[in-house]
Image (spheres, grey):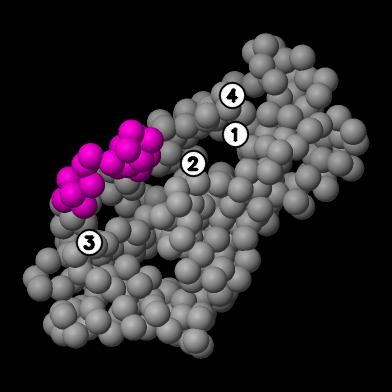
Amino acid sequence: MIVFKDPVLSDRAWVENCFSRSGNQGCEYSFVTLFVWKDVFHQQAARLDGYLLERLRGRLGGAYLFPAGSGPLLPALEALAADARERGEPCRLVCVTPEQRAQLAAVWPGRFTEEEDRDGFDYLYDIDRLADLPGRRLQSKRNHINRFESICPDWSVEEIGPENLAECAAMDREWNRLRRGQPESEEETLADERHALSLAFCHYRELGLSGLLLRAEGRVAAFTMGSPIGPDTFDVHFEKAFSDLPGAYPLINREFARWLRERHPGLRWLNREDDMGLEGLRQAKSSYHPDRMVEKSTVELLDAL
């Protein structure tokens, strides 16, 4: 049985190295995601030759992430199959991309089933489009921003750092207080996110996070933060804005894209992660007309047990 361990901050260097070598743009291939969501999804990691192996537990039960790294793939996959067999569980791989399915088909031909996970698709946007909001399709975003600027002409943005992290945490507490009474499934999702975000706040610098806050009328009206996935993609892990200030969301979104573009000239894509099957979130992400989607499936080995 593979010895999986809870991720700790000192794992960041080797984990990021494996994720970078995988070339995957999905939000799961980020040390920040692994670390801040580890308690919610019981995520654990192990090293095998040139690969990171990750075990987690979600709504389907025990599962694995597709091995991240480089080198011969078959030994890593067979190690996961043997681990699942010893645990008496199916060998299930989640968040499998089309490229990874092709790799599976080459080494495990006819040995697995697959099911699309639309709720887990990540939304990718060209950074220039989010920074400039050009064209008729994004006219509504520009209109919302204009409305915000007319209501709050004194708005400003600040880089998130030790001096204002506590204000962001306070804003998040108030944001969640205003959403009490949501349907049970959404309440659970919000509770999970609060826990993940609390870890991000506590270990902001150690995790290599970057963020921006929007200040208006003397208070933090919105904030966003994320981390790189590879050389040309940046993952937006968290984004919050008060709904009583129309236009706060598109404004922090635009300003963060501009800020990142200036700081990281090699960035091309912003990954704004998945919609978790929440209709409102799906509409919000779709309204920006994503340039690409990171498609994902759940794969199960037929002869693992």
Inter-mark Cα distance, 2 to 1: 9 Å
Decide: few, some or many residues near mark 2? Use Cα within 10 Å; few <14, some 14-19, many ≥20: many
In this figure, which residue is indicated by the disc labeled 3? 242
Between 242 and 136, the residue placed more toward the observer is 136
Which portion, as a residue range, is magenta? 173-194
Q: Residue at x 66, y 47 (%)?
A: 296
The residue under the point 37% across, 83% down is: 142
Q: What element carries label 3?
A: loop
Q: Is mark 4 on a helix, strand or loop?
A: strand
For disc 1, the marked residue is 54
The residue under label 2 is which amino acid type? Leu
Q: Which of marks 4 and 1 is nearer the N terminus?
A: 1
Per the model, the C-alpha gap separating discs 4 and 2 is: 16 Å
User: Outermost residue toward the bottom?
Assistant: 135
Please, what is the three-letter code of the amino acid marked with disc 4?
Gly
Q: Where does the image place residue 169, in percent across and percent down from the top left?
A: 20, 51
Q: What residue type is labelled 3?
A: Phe
Q: Which of marks 2 and 3 is nearer the N terminus?
A: 2
* Disc 2 element: helix
Residue corresponding to mark 2: 34
Tags 2 and 1 touching, CB below 8 Å: yes
The disc, 3 or 1, on the residue closer to the chain's N-terminal end is 1
Front tag of 4 and 1: 4
Q: Would residue 278 be found to the left or right of residue 101 on screen?
A: left
User: Residue 246: within the magenta?
Assistant: no
Asked if labels 1 and 3 touch by Cβ distance under 8 angstroms, the answer is no
Q: What element carries label 1?
A: strand
Q: Earlier in the sequence, mark 4 or mark 2?
A: 2
Residue receiving disc 4: 62
Circle 3 Cα neighbour tier, 10 Å, few/some/many (<14 / 14–19 / ≥20): some
